[in-house]
Each structure stands twice: as C-alpha cells, then as structure tokens.
Amino acid sequence: MKKLLVLTLALASSFAALRAQTPDSKTPTFDVASIKQNKTGAENGFFGGPASRWTATNVPLRQFIVFAFQMQAFQFVGMPEWAVTERWDIAAKSERRFPPNPGGIAPNPTVLMLRALLEDRFKLVAHIEKRQAPVYELVLARTDKVLGPELHKSDVDCQELLAASQRGQPLPQPPPGKMLCGITTNTGRISAGAQPIDRLATQLSQLLQRVVVNRTGLMDVYDFELTYLPERIPGAAGADAVPPADPNLPSVFTALQEQLGLKLDSNRAPIDMLVIDHVERPTDD
C-alpha cells in the first residue's frame, strides 16, 4: 500500500469543546461542495484554505475525520478499509463571512463545517465512548517544580486580542520567530504563544500516536518551543517526512525534560474513542 504523507495540522481551536459540539441548525455549513474520487494514484495529499474556498486534493476519508473531530486515527474504531485507501477531492465554498481570527485564537469554523459535510455527503454516523488504552501522562520533571528554559508563563490575553482585532484595533507584534497566540507544529519543532499545556499534550498525542494526558497541574497559558529529532512512527503525523539535518537533536522525550522541564510517564486510562457506526462512499458530482 502506498504511504500517504500525513500532514501535520496546526489547529488552534479548543479540542475538547469542539468534540462536545454536534452540528445542528445553527452550525455553519458550506453553501456548495463538490466531491470526486481521486484515482491518480499519487501518494501525497493536501487540504486547507479559508472557509470561503476550502479545498482538498487526494485525501482519504480518515484524514477528513481526523480534522473534523479533532481526534487522532488511533482513536477510531470501525473505520472501513476504503476510508483509508481511497482518496477524494473536495471543493467547498461558503458565502458566510467570519470575523478576523489572529493567530487562531477563536475556534476554527471550518472544523464544524467539514463535520456537517461528512455527515451529509458521506452519511457519517459516529459516537464517542470511553475505552481503556495505554496513555502517556505529562508531568513535571522536577520535584521543585522548576520549569525548563523554553517554557515561560505568558501574560497575553488572547481573547482580549481577538476582541480588539474585531474592533479594528492594531495588535502588538510578537518577537521574530515567535507566535503571539496559537500553536504551530513542523517536523521536529512545536512552537506556541499563550497556550495552555493541554495544547502541548494534544500535539504530543498526534506525534506519538498515543493519548497524552496533562497531569502537570499547570493552569496558566504559556509560551514554549520544543525542538527534537523526529522518529518515524508508523501512522504518525509526518512519519514519512525528511528528518532535520542535525542528527544530534534529542528525542522528544529528552527534549521535553531538557527544554520544558516536563516528562512523559506510561500508564493506562479510559480515553475517548470515535466509533464509526455508519459511513458510505459519496456520489461524485
């Protein structure tokens, strides 16, 4: 089977809140959407863009579900084989205008719009249930609770910045190479501005293909940067990506301790699993 270059997604919405929502009459939806099966045989795929003109090229249904439900593929149960092997192109448009969202401060409306599209066109029916599974617990590495040199408490109020942006007020500029609000993930690097540690746990879950539970007790928002040597974990985001040129970078486990003052402990716990009750291929249009 050909490997897909799974794209690392930098999502700045509240994952728990989005999973709790269910599309209804008030949920934003695409006004028009065209879906066609892609039979080119190409290995790589892409999706993205603004809600007004959102496109996908050569992407399996599983990746759409990852994005729409803000969960990882290892949390899916009952996914049919064709949802992994067959690829799809989508061209969707929305005439609705959403307010400015600097740094991804507010929830991404495209997430719920795509979920509604999957339910309408792929006839997707799913539910979330708890199941016991291996997890990592993210905890403080030091008993004196001293944080690492790349983890700093932030005094930025992202919600106030969002409100100021919507009022047309100029926003302060972050230092070069830093984020004011939000989080980005590239191969071998996670960088964030004014984000809760739960966001780091989510990115680590995606990277390690195991749920990471935040047990740090850190309740504020933080600026942090984690640089590590990525491993080729089967099925993980960026698994087929070319690693950085410097082989002397630490593993993500070592980097967490040295740079952020955190560590990962193995355990078992009940985690959310998305159970696919029904899904079917859409009709090309």
Image (cartoon, grey):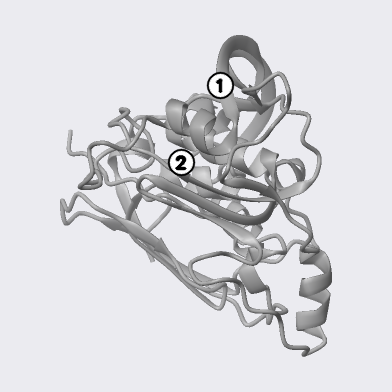
Q: Residue at x 53, y 28 (%)?
A: 257
**Dot 2: what SS?**
loop
Which residue is pictured at 67% across the width and 48% down the height?
Answer: 152
Please give the name of the residue rendered at 76% of the width and 41% of the height, measured from the top-left corner.
20
Looking at the image, residue 231 sits to the left or right of residue 201; the answer is left
Q: Is residue 8 left or right of residue 240?
A: right
Pointers 2 and 1 in contact (C-beta within 8 Å): no
Q: Earlier in the sequence, mark 2 or mark 1?
A: 1
Q: Nearer the viewer, residue 102 or 15?
A: 102
Q: Looking at the rendered structure, which numbered label has been put on residue 225?
A: none
Front one among 246 and 120: 246
Picture quadrant where residue 252 is located? top left
Please state which amino acid type lies under the numbered disc 2.
Glu
Q: In the visual, does 46 lie left or right of 49?
A: left
Left or right of residue 105, residue 81 in this image: left
**Residue 108 shows in this picture:** yes
In this rendering, does residue 273 appear at all? Answer: no
Name the residue beneath numbered marker 1: 264
Q: Quarter-wise, where is residue 71 in the image?
A: top right
Instruction: Find residue 26 and report its horizontal and vertical position in percent.
Output: 80, 63
The x and y percentages for residue 141 are 62, 23
Mark 2–mark 1 distance (CA, rounded to whole Å): 39 Å
Q: Amino acid at mark 1?
A: Leu
Residue at point 75%, 49% (across, down): 221
Q: Which mark is residue 280?
A: 2
